[in-house]
Amino acid sequence: MSSTPYSTLDGVSHPYYPVDATVPFYVANTTPLLTILFSFAGLIAGFVVLCIAVSKYVNPKLRRSDVAVIAWFAVCGFLHLFFEGYFVLNHKTIPGSQDLFAQLWKEYGLSDSRYLTADPFMIWIETLTVLIWGPLSLLTIYFIATEQTALRHITQVVVCIGHLYGVALYYGTCHYVERYQGLRYSRPEWVYYWGYYAGMNAPWGVVPVLLLWGSVKEIKRAFEDGAGRKNL
Amino acid sequence: MSSTPYSTLDGVSHPYYPVDATVPFYVANTTPLLTILFSFAGLIAGFVVLCIAVSKYVNPKLRRSDVAVIAWFAVCGFLHLFFEGYFVLNHKTIPGSQDLFAQLWKEYGLSDSRYLTADPFMIWIETLTVLIWGPLSLLTIYFIATEQTALRHITQVVVCIGHLYGVALYYGTCHYVERYQGLRYSRPEWVYYWGYYAGMNAPWGVVPVLLLWGSVKEIKRAFEDGAGRKNL
C-alpha cells in the first residue's frame, strides 16, 4: 500500500485509520494483492467443493437448494474456523507477519483497523464466532446431508440469528464510535469503506434473512402437519 | 453513596470506576436506595401480573409452565422496552437526573460505569435490545396465550439466542477490556461486582438455555409427528 497518510506515531508508520492508531511492529505486505486475494478465494472455493462433495457422497439425493445452503455454510465455516480463528490466535503478531492470512488481515484492516490494534470488542466477538458460529455452521451442513430436518432448521435459525446480531453489532459499534467519539476505523477511499467494510460483510445481513424465512416456513409446516395428524 | 474514592477530575466528583471516567453533570441520588429498589420491583411485578392476567383472560386453559414462561418474558419485555428504552433515550442526561429510572441507572452504574459514560457499545447493544428483543419478548407472550405453537417456539428460540449472545458479549467485552486495557468498570465492593454486575445479568445466561432446550424438544417432536403422519 502506498496510499497516504502514513502514521509515524510510536515510531511505526502504517496506512491505517485513525492515523494515530497503535499498530505495533507493522510491516507492509510483501505478496502482491491479487495473489493473496486469489489464494484466499481458491482456499474458500476448495473448502466449499469439499463440503459439497462429501455431502453428496453421504446423500446423493440432495436437492439443489440444499446444495446452495451447504455452500453458504461452508463459506461461513471456513471463514469462522480458519480465517477468524487465525485472527483470534494471532491478533498480536498479525501486523508484523507475512503469513497468507496475516497479509489478508492487514489488507482488510485498511477498512477496519480494529483487527490490527487488538481491540477488545473485536477479539471477543471473534472468539465467540470461532467457538460457536463456526462449529454450528458445519453442524448445519451435517444435519442437511443426513436429512435430520428438525435439527437442521434449529441450528440454521440459531446461526442466522447469530449472524444477523453479529453484523448489526459490527456495523453499529463502528457507526456509534464514529458518531460519539469521532473515530473512523476505515481509510476514506471508496474501495475500503464501501468495498471491504460495507460490501464484504453485507452478505451476513442478507443471506441469513432468506434462510431464516425458509426455516420459519418449514417449522410452521411441521407443527401444522403434526396438528393435522392428531386430528386424524 | 458515600463510598470512596470519588473522582474529582473534570470538576465533577462521582463514585464510579474507573475513577477518571467522565460522568458529566453527575449528582448523587436523592431517594433512599430501598425506596427506588422496591419501586422498581413493584413496577416489574405489576407488569408481570398484568401480562399473566391478560393471557389468562385470552386463554383460560394456560398450563402452569406456560404461565412461568409468560412471567419470564414479561420481565424481559418490561426491562427491555421501558428500563433499557429509558437508557437509550436519556443516556446523556441520566447522571444529572433524579427520575426513578435515572436513579436506578446511577445505582446500577456503580457496577458498570459504561451506562453513565455514553459508551458506544452499550448504547448500540441496548438500542438493538429495545428495538428487537423487547417486542419479540412480548410477541412470544402473545403467541403463547393464543396457542400459536410454531411461532411461539420460533420467537422463543430467537429471543433466547439473542439473550445468550448478548450476555456473552456483555460479560466478555468487560472481561477483555479489563484484561487488555486494564480498565475496570465496576466498583470493587462485592455487592457491585458480584451482586449487580455478575448476579443481576446471570439469569439471562441461564433461563434462555432452559427455554431453548424446551423449544428444541418441541420442534423435534413436531417434525417427528409430521413425518409420522406422512407415513400413515
Image (spheres, coloured by chain):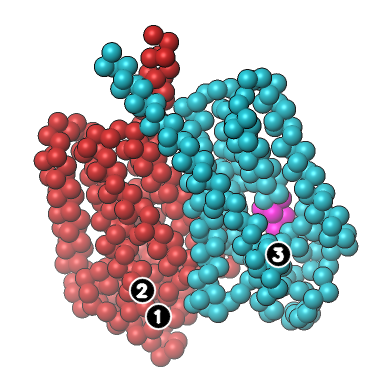
Chain colours: A red, B cyan
> What span is colored magenta in the figure?
B86-93
Query: Would you place residue A38 above or below residue A49 in this image?
Result: below
Residue A113 placed where, x, y %?
Answer: 41, 70
Tell me if mark 3 has few (under 14), some (14-19) or many (20+) residues whose alpha carbon lies within 10 angstroms of its own: many
Query: Would you place residue B192 above or below residue B156 in this image?
Result: below
Amino acid type assigned to the residue bearing label 1 in the image:
Val
Q: Chain of mark 1?
A: A
Q: Is residue B71 left or right of residue A95?
A: right
Q: Is residue A35 left or right of residue A116?
A: left
Q: Chain of mark 3?
A: B
The reply to whether label 1 and label 3 mark residues of one chain is: no
CA gap between label 1 and label 3 equals 32 Å
Amino acid type assigned to the residue bearing label 3 in the image:
Gly
**Residue B188's quadrant in the figure?**
bottom right
The reply to whether label 2 and label 3 mark residues of one chain is: no
Tell me if mark 2 has few (under 14), some (14-19) or many (20+) residues whose alpha carbon lies within 10 angstroms of its own: some
Q: Which residue is mark 1?
A: A23
Q: Which residue is mark 2?
A: A91
Query: Would you place residue B131 above or below residue A231 in this image?
Result: below
* Residue under the image location 46 percent in, 41 percent down: B213
Residue A190 placed where, x, y %?
Answer: 37, 60
Q: Name the dominant secondary structure of the magenta segment.
A: helix
Q: Which residue is mark 3?
A: B109
Q: Quadrant of the C terminus of chain A?
A: top left
User: Which of marks 2 and 1 precedes in the sequence?
Assistant: 1
Nearer-the-camera pick, B216 or A22 = B216
Q: Quadrant of the N terminus of chain A?
A: bottom left
* Residue under the image location 14 percent in, 45 percent down: A54
